[in-house]
Structure formats: C-alpha cells, structure tokens
Image (cartoon, helix red, strand yellow):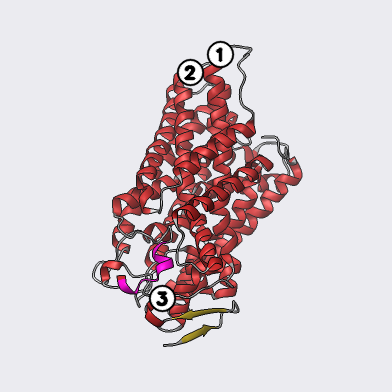
Amino acid sequence: MGEAAIDLDLDVYYKDEAGSADNIAEAPLHIVMAMDDYGAELKGEEDPVSHDVSAGNKAQAEPWDARLPLTESRKGNAMKAVFHVVCSGIGVQTLLLPVALATLGWTWGILILTAAFAWQLYTIWILVHLHESPSGIRYSRYLQLTIHAFGPKLGKLLGIFPVMYLSGGTCVMLIITGGGAMRTLFRIIACGDAATCHAVSLTGAEWFLVFTCIAIAVAQLPNLNSIAGVSLIGAITGVAYCTIIWVLAVQEGHAGSLSHEPLVLAAGKSGWARAGDALNAVGIIALAFRGHNLILEIQGTLPSSPKEPSKGPMWKAVMISYSLISLCFYPLAIAGFWASGNNVIIPSGGMLRAISNSDRQHVSKFLLGLILVLVILNSLCVFQIYAMPVFDNFEIRYTSITGKRWCNLSARTCLRLLFGLLAYLISVAFPFLGSLAPLIGGLTSPLTFAYPCLMWVRIRKPQRASATWWFNSVIGCLGLILSAFLVAAALWNLIDKGLDANFFKP
C-alpha cells in the first residue's frame, strides 16, 4: 500500500510492504509503543501485531513487536495471570491499612475500604473488556489504550506520567523497601536482642546495591510470560507475610487501655486539620490498590481468537486474584487496628514497623526474621513485573534509534543493567521517596479510579445521557475530583509537618 504518513504530530511513518515496519527513530520514547496499534486503527485495518499468532497472522507479525518483552509470548493462561495479578496487587503499602482505620474509625474505615475495593474492581472489568476492540485490535499497553481513547496529544499527557511512575517509581520504592529490610534482617541475625551490637553492617547505600544486583540478575528473564514462576513466588510471599502479621496481631490481643476512637475526631484539631487527616486516610486506602497499569499487559500474554477472546480467562483470573487479595486486606486492616489501636500510627512503617520496633519483645526472633525474608523475596519478585513495561519501553527506543528490528541478548542485558543503575541511583539520592508517596499517589490515582471509566465512554460510545453514559461519566469525574483532593491533602500534610529530605543518606 506504499508509504503512509500518519498525522500524529510525531513525524512518524509506516511502511506496509512485505508486512514489515520501518524505522521509527523520530518518535518520542513514551509514544512509540502506542503507535502501531493506533496507526492501524487510523488506517482502518486490523493490527497484525496485536493478534495472537495462533490466529494465522504469524507471518504478518511485526518483528520488533513480536520480540518485545510484553508481547514476545502470548502463551499464558488464566493461572499464570492469577500469579501476576496477585503479585502486583499486594505489597508493603497494604501494611498501612490499619493506619487508615485508626484515622477514620471502624465504620467509615471499613465502608471506604469496601467502596474503594468495588470501585477499582469495576475499573479492572472495564480494562479487561477494552483490551480487544471489535475489529480485533489488542491493546497490550495502558498507554496504547489512553492514546486510542483520548488521542495522541491528550492521551500522552494524561497517561505518560502515571504509567512511567507506577513502573519505574515502584521499582525504586522496592529497592528502598527491600534494601531496608535486608539491613534490619542483618541486625536481627547479628545482634539479636542485645542492647549493644558490635557487628559491622553495610551502609544503607550498600544494602540498596545488594538488592538491586539480585533484582537485575533475576530480571534477565526475557519476557512477561517467562516470569510467571517469579510472580508465583511473589504472590505466595505477599499473602504469607500479610497473613502472619494479622495472625500475630490477633494472637497478641490488645490491651484494655488502647483507644479505638477515630483520630479524625480528636479534640483540639481544627476543621482543616481533620479534613486533611481524613483525606490522607482515604489516600492510604486508595494507594493500597495497585497494579492497574499492568492489567492490559498481563492480559496481553494470553492467547486470543474471535471465538475465544482473552477477556474470559482474564476476568476469571482477576476474580480469583482479588478474592485472595481481599483475604489479605480486610483481616490485616481490622486485626491490625483492633490489636494496636491508635498506636499503629507510624509515618512510614505501619504494621511492619510496629512489629519490628514496639513488639519485638512479644514476637520471636525467628518470626520477625521470617517476615523480613518474605518481604525481601516479595520485593524482588514484584520488582520484575513492574520493571517489565520499562524494559519494553527501553527496547522500543533502542530499536527506533538503531534501526534494528529487535534487541539481541547483549543489548537487552545492557538496557536492563542501565535501568538497574538508574533505579539504584534514584533510590540512594531520594531515600525519603516513601514520604512523598501520598502526593505522587494522588497524582497517579486517576489511572485506577478515573481513566478507565472515561475511556469506556470515549471508546464504546454509549448513548448520550443513557444510564451507562451517566454512570461512567460521573464515576470518572469523581475519580478526578478524588485525585485533586488527595494531592491537596498531601501538600497540606507536607507543609504542616515538613519533609525529612535526607538526600543521599539512605
């Protein structure tokens, strides 16, 4: 069909001859990975890359897309998808849920947790059903879908920051968490309960480096489907340490002097302070639900055909996964608050810090060490799935610059080592990044609570003013309003309490 220029204001050109894609070196990094599907959509053709190879399109598959980490293998299944979803959905941010209940109280805390759970589950349902268009195009990257829904300029503006932060930024946070857990584990093993310890430990930066080296060594697995076993370990360890912590909380019980009065109602607080505390608690609950930026990518590993689309097994995997996740979230939030009361309020540690510091005399050295080992293993495994979109983006950029159709093994290894180095340097330079999580989480929350609903309206085009149109429009707008309030509350909290910005001092 000759050479077709696509007017995306990106100076990008496609060639269709012999079913191959030409060099796209001029395309920006964050938009390249969406161009193939979007370009095919503009040309009114089915995208040969996005179809499963079993559908008879193997010969037409674009070589660079067929070798990218997210779309290299479409031989996954519902069970592997469960591993990925649970692994990406449970993390140390879950351990802060008792803090939210301590602020909001029993009734409002559980109601808001339930509302957020249902809300984000609905937006996942939307993403699963938008993964494949009626014409057969598969959107295997979140940014592809935002550009398809909102156009190249607005889609890039809305999607690039949350998608990139929730991938690369999460990996940086995992280095900080995993490295810190390694340091604490060393102290427990070397010093035990001794008041003084003469063991020589590595510095914080060195522990971060140890964690990063291990993570990048594991990250040499080629594609998302190939790390299913790693995600299984991540899912098991995540469920395990959440379960151990809430079981310990129930076993220890609570002292009669503990207060369960909502902190938001504490005397002496102004109305603005109470509103800020309440919104911060809502933010903690909202941030507990993560992984939406990976749903389309995980579904992209499943085979699909017109008779058996991938949305069936993917939604089954989501339901199984979130049944397991709910069995972690609710017991941990309820038991943690019941056992610790308002004493669980620790700025950046939640239940893990409460157990490792305050309750060490009640928790055996073995159990505390086991919890830390599980946190370390979970952080290493979660690192892999969140890093995969970054690796995918790096390889797209590499092929666009060099003109090669795919990355060879040495280039792929070097790109992943480069990402590991960048993530390590950021974690050492900004070890206080967790203190900014409420602020950045508020900025990225529309990806979970707003964009899917608005994309449903833009793509499926329900009849204007119909029940479906109103429901999704209202929910999407509420998600944007929630994001604005969470950002405002986080800024208020930083201004009121300050920020301990310990640059280069992990």
In the rendered structure, find residue 79 and report the number of the disc placed on it. Answer: none
Region of the chain picked out in magenta, as a range: 59-67
- Of labels 2 and 3, earlier in sequence is 3
Q: Residues within 10 Å of mark 3 (few under 14, many from 20)?
A: some
Residue 485 can be seen in this image: yes
Q: Residues within 10 Å of mark 1 (few under 14, many from 20)?
A: few
Outermost residue on the bottom side: it is: 1
Circle 2 residue: 365
Q: Are marks 3 and 1 in contact (CB under 8 Å)?
A: no
Q: Considering the numbered disc 3 on the image, is that residue within a helix, a strand or a loop?
A: loop
Residue sitting at 64 percent across and 40 percent down?
Answer: 265
| Alpha carbons under labels 2 and 3: distance apart | 60 Å
**Is residue 35 rendered to the left or right of residue 270?**
left
Between 126 and 331, the one lying in front of the other is 126
Q: Are marks 1 and 2 in contact (CB under 8 Å)?
A: yes
Circle 1 residue: 193
Residue 258 can be seen in this image: no
Q: Considering the numbered disc 2 on the image, is that residue within a helix, a strand or a loop?
A: helix
Outermost residue on the left side: it is: 307
- Of labels 3 and 1, earlier in sequence is 3
Q: Nearer the viewer, mark 2 or mark 3?
A: 3
Residue sitting at 70 percent across and 45 percent down?
Answer: 493
Residue sitting at 56 percent across and 74 percent down?
Answer: 152
> Where does residue 135 sit, x and y in percent of width and height?
35, 78
Quarter holding the N terminus is: bottom left
Circle 3 residue: 20
